[in-house]
Image (cartoon, rainbow, N blue to C red):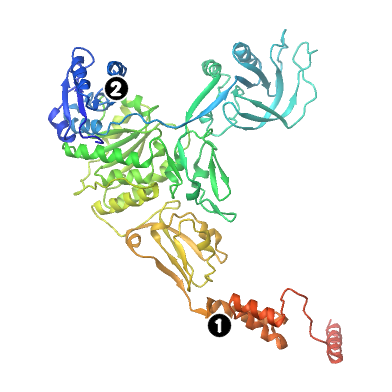
Amino acid sequence: MADAKRHLMICTCERSMPLDREVIARGCGGCGITQANHLCGADLPLFREAIARGEPVTVACTQEAPLFREVAAETSFVDLIFANIRENGGWSKDAGSAGPKAAALLAAAEPEQAVAPISFESDGIILIYGRDEAAIEAGRRLAGRLDITVLLSHPENVAPRPVDDFPVLKGDIRTAHGHLGAFELTIDGFALPSPSSREVLRFGVSRDGAVSNCDIILDLTGNPPLFPAPDLRAGYLRADPRDPLAVERAIFQAGDLVGTFDKPVFIRFDASLCAHSRSGITGCRRCLDLCPAGAITPNGDAVAIDPAICGGCGFCAAACPTGAATYAVPGPEGQIGRLRTMLSAYHAAGGRQATVLFHDADHGEPLVDALARYGDGLPANVIPFRVNEVTQVGPESIAATLAYGGSDVVFLTRERPRHDIAGLRQVVDWSNTTATALGFGSDAVRIIQADDPDRLRADLDDIPLRGEIAEPSSFMPLGGRRSLMETAFRELHHAAPSPVERIALSQGAPFGSVDLDVGRCTLCHACVTACPTGALSAEPDRPMLRFAEIACVQCGLCEATCPEDAITLDPRLDFVAWEAPRRTLKEEEPFLCISCGTPFGTKSTIERIVAKLEEKHWMYRGANANHLDLVRMCENCRATAMVHEGFDPSAPQRRPVLTTDDFLRARDAGKDSGSAG
């Protein structure tokens, strides 16, 4: 654990679960331990004694955390963190053997991380978008709290209101942009109501392209959503008008969206590491293709991530091959550090066959809680690991888990996830391919989609027992995300039961090589200029192309940039190539300047250019053949020769003088072709 001197307060919760103090002590070596049966009640003085000593304290209870914080505040004690060993292990049919898991959870317990927020300002200007009187009724319900405008799409048989206390307009939203406090809508068929409407509400002349701004949108049309991943868009509320309960819930939520609201900035982004584009040519599109919320857009050579739209799914961070995008809560270094601490404590306490269960707080935590309260609880070897979103977990964390001695990695999602989890499936696929090839067993990484606690337990019980690695890694997670990725996979290879040198991966993997068609390559070095990581390089004094596989992120910029189509990507893990020095993909003899002997270009390229000019262009034939020497000179000598000889290839050139014989031959040739016709 981060601080080996922490004092652990463990409790049987009124003897509702067994505790093995000795096992916990082995896993959390160096920690003092106080054991109680009713720490939040009769044994509360034990807690007061512990904080009075001034030692950092970890309490093995989250249910009564408010009480313990209140008691600690009486003496201004702040170094207090909590771990849940009851629902996560003690309340289980396997509780008698859950001591190592309790040690792991206590060792890895950390305080909640503070995240820099972004703020939204909403003045309560709401657009209610509907089809009929249900939208107008929602407006009446909210009129006392919000500034209401109702927009009806193709309204029919809507009765006029006795008093127009808020605008009711007609139109269809063509496009919608923005977020809470800053929506901008483009509306077609926009029209104002006629004040003389009698039996039904009628509207005047309509127009397209009207622009409207609002703070909140309440969509009651029942149509497809205005935004991708609509549940992630702050300020956009949507309900099926045929579902009264959903409409009530949306109206209630809308009424509270006035004021200032903070939202975490989920993603840290370093544009200097982005491999999206160079010189107008697109390379890596992983984040753009995966983002469900539409928060990522091209921005020159990099992309831009709008934190106000970002829903925090973490797909971009998990897929980014360079580390330009990293998750902030927690970052990859902190996440892998917790995994290291947790698995180290688990093994030190005698635990075996550890399965790490990644889950979120919104779905996974209540499911684990329900399984503990009403079912068989989690198996003793399943260690839950809460993250903000399971889709934020990248291949580096999976590789680290297996390298640290975890037997299996499981991601818990809803049966019907809120957004497509294709990115997670891709990461699981790469990781399984690697784990299988290295001897960790097939399906060591898996996704469980469950909404029922008993289904979760059954799926966890179906995971087969595996052989354990002889020497788990203990590497410290240091450096940026790309460096962590490389280290984690190296350590995975070192710890592997059956290490192999090379593993083929599917397209989109963050590691690999490039295949060069040597015959096509002209050593123009356009690929070197485009490569954002320096994986491809040139040498200043010899025409060659070199490659360092460890630096390649498979962004595709070299493949897209190459004018000769000589490069293709080869996604793979090649552990030997990672350790090897740069290899030469192609090398040629340099051409030596005929004037000063300076090497420039390649011999084959200069000879090919000379041959083409001599064959195709009159400026370099006959009396002008000496102009070819300019091609054979280096840049400096060429400039000197052009000045001294007065040769300007861009100026109008004198064509050869034609004689009478030339005209006669041309005339005779024309007659012959005419008679032949």
Name the residue located 85 percent from the left edge and 92 percent from the top edge.
Answer: 661
**Residue 1 visible in the shown view:** yes
Q: Nearer the viewer, mark 1 or mark 2?
A: 1
Q: Could you say which disc has been placed on residue 62 in the image?
A: 2
In the rendering, at what x and y percent does residue 92 appear? 23, 25
Q: Residue at the top extreme?
A: 162
In the rendering, at what x and y percent does residue 555 appear? 48, 54
Tell me the amino acid under the disc marked 2. Thr
Tell me the amino acid under the disc marked 1. Cys
Q: Is residue 637 left or right of residue 618?
A: left
Real-space CA distance between mark 1 and mark 2, rounded to the nearest whole angstrom:
80 Å
Name the residue located 50 percent from the left edge and 40 percent from the top edge.
Answer: 291
In the rendering, at what x and y percent does residue 86 appear? 24, 24
In the rendering, at what x and y percent does residue 98 appear? 19, 30
Residue in the foreground of this view, choosing between 163 and 8: 8
Query: Label 2 crowding class (10 Å Cα cut-off): few <14, some 14-19, many 20+?
Result: some
Tell me which corner region of the image, top left, top right, bottom left or bottom right, holds residue 28: top left
**Residue 235 visible in the shown view:** no
Split into 4 quadrants, where in the image is the C terminus? bottom right
Q: Determine whether 448 is above or below 275 in the image.
A: above
Q: Secondary structure at mark 2?
A: loop
Q: Determine whether 8 is above or below 144 in the image.
A: below
Residue in the foreground of this view, choosing between 582 and 441: 582
Residue located beneath label 1 in the image: 596
Q: Is residue 515 left or right of residue 243?
A: left
Residue in the foreground of this view, choosing between 470 and 201: 470
Residue in the foreground of this view, choosing between 629 and 311: 629
Tell me which corner region of the image, top left, top right, bottom left or bottom right, holds residue 334: top left
Query: Label 1 crowding class (10 Å Cα cut-off): few <14, some 14-19, many 20+?
Result: few
Q: Determine whether 5 is above or below 538 in the image.
A: above
Q: Residue at the left extreme?
A: 22
Q: Determine whether 106 is above or below 478 in the image.
A: above
